[in-house]
Image (cartoon, rainbow, N blue to C red):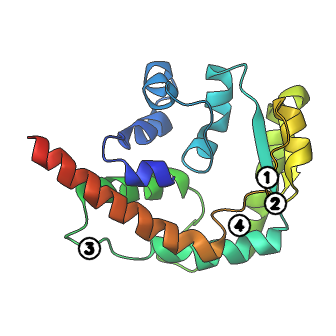
């Protein structure tokens, strides 16, 4: 998500179109062709389509307690979704926000995002999604990890050496808004550079 937010050349419409039309192979290559890996939304929203498009790809599903997930979402994504996008915000951020609301948050609220999230429904969605991934992705392509589990199983699954450094930890609820601010700053710099070229 951070890359999508900070890069004004990203076509956020790809994911909106993908949510409306499943025959999307050519556009997937435009988005993912230059990358070896992708994490977070909007990628995770389309894990089924992408696993079919890239049949050699390995899928890593990180899991946590449903209670900690719900609390984290309430502090971050759900809270941010209620904010109005300022008029002076870069156009790319406006488009990204539109994409998030139409695609990655689709289904979180039955009565619209202005209503309070229904904890029971959301926790059921969370658990159902985990079970769905287990059903859809063949076991040999799927690694299920607890958040913060460490390098060993991850590196073995990917066929990589264990790095001589601490296991990374990113995008927790404390870092969420810091990352959003960083992405916005990077985007403003990128837009100035692009404007200077024209």
Mark toward the start of the polypeptide (2 vs 1)? 1
Task: Kindly state the secondary structure of the residue where label 2 is placed.
Answer: loop
For disc 3, the marked residue is 86
For disc 1, the marked residue is 62
Residue 136 picture location, percent across and down? 80, 33
Task: Kindly state the secondary structure of the residue where label 1 is placed.
Answer: strand
Residues tagged 4 and 2 counted as in contact (Cβ below 8 A): no
Residue 10 picture location, percent across and down? 36, 41
For disc 2, the marked residue is 147
Pair 4/1: label in front = 1
Mark toward the start of the polypeptide (4 vs 1)? 1
What label does residue 122 carry, if any? 4
Residues tagged 2 and 3 counted as in contact (Cβ below 8 A): no
Above or below residue 113? Residue 1 is: above
Pair 2/3: label in front = 2
Mark toward the start of the polypeptide (2 vs 3)? 3
> Alpha carbon of mark 2 to alpha carbon of mark 3: how far?
34 Å
Q: Is residue 112 visible?
A: no
Viewer-nearest residue: 113 or 90: 90
Mark toward the start of the polypeptide (1 vs 3)? 1
Residue 12 picture location, percent across and down? 38, 44
Pair 4/2: label in front = 2
Q: Residue at x 27, y 51 (%)?
A: 190
Task: Kindly state the secondary structure of the residue where label 4 is placed.
Answer: helix
Q: State the image quarter where residue 117 is shown.
A: bottom right
Q: Residue at x 78, y 74 (%)?
A: 68
Residues tagged 2 and 1 counted as in contact (Cβ below 8 A): yes
> Alpha carbon of mark 3 to alpha carbon of mark 4: how far?
28 Å
Above or below residue 63? Residue 72 is: below
Is residue 53 found left or right of 166 in the rendered image?
A: left
């Amino acid at each position: 998500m951070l890359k999508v937010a900070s890069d004004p050349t990203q076509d956020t419409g790809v994911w909106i179109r993908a949510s409306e039309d499943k025959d999307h192979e050519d556009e997937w290559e435009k988005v993912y062709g230059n990358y070896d890996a992708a994490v977070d939304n909007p990628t995770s929203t389309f894990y089924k389509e992408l696993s079919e498009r890239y049949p050699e790809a390995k899928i890593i599903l990180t899991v946590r307690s449903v209670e900690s997930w719900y609390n984290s979402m309430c502090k971050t994504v759900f809270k941010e979704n209620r904010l109005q996008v300022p008029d002076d915000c870069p156009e790319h951020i406006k488009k990204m926000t539109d994409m998030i609301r139409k695609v990655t948050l689709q289904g979180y609220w039955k009565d619209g995002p202005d209503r309070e999230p229904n904890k029971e429904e959301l926790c059921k969605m969370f658990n159902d999604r985990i079970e769905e991934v287990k059903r859809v992705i063949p076991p040999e392509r799927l690694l299920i990890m607890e958040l913060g589990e460490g390098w060993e199983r991850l590196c073995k699954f990917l066929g990589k050496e264990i790095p001589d450094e601490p296991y990374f930890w990113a995008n927790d609820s404390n870092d969420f808004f810091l990352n959003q601010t960083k992405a916005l700053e990077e985007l403003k710099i990128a837009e100035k550079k692009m404007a200077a070229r024209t």
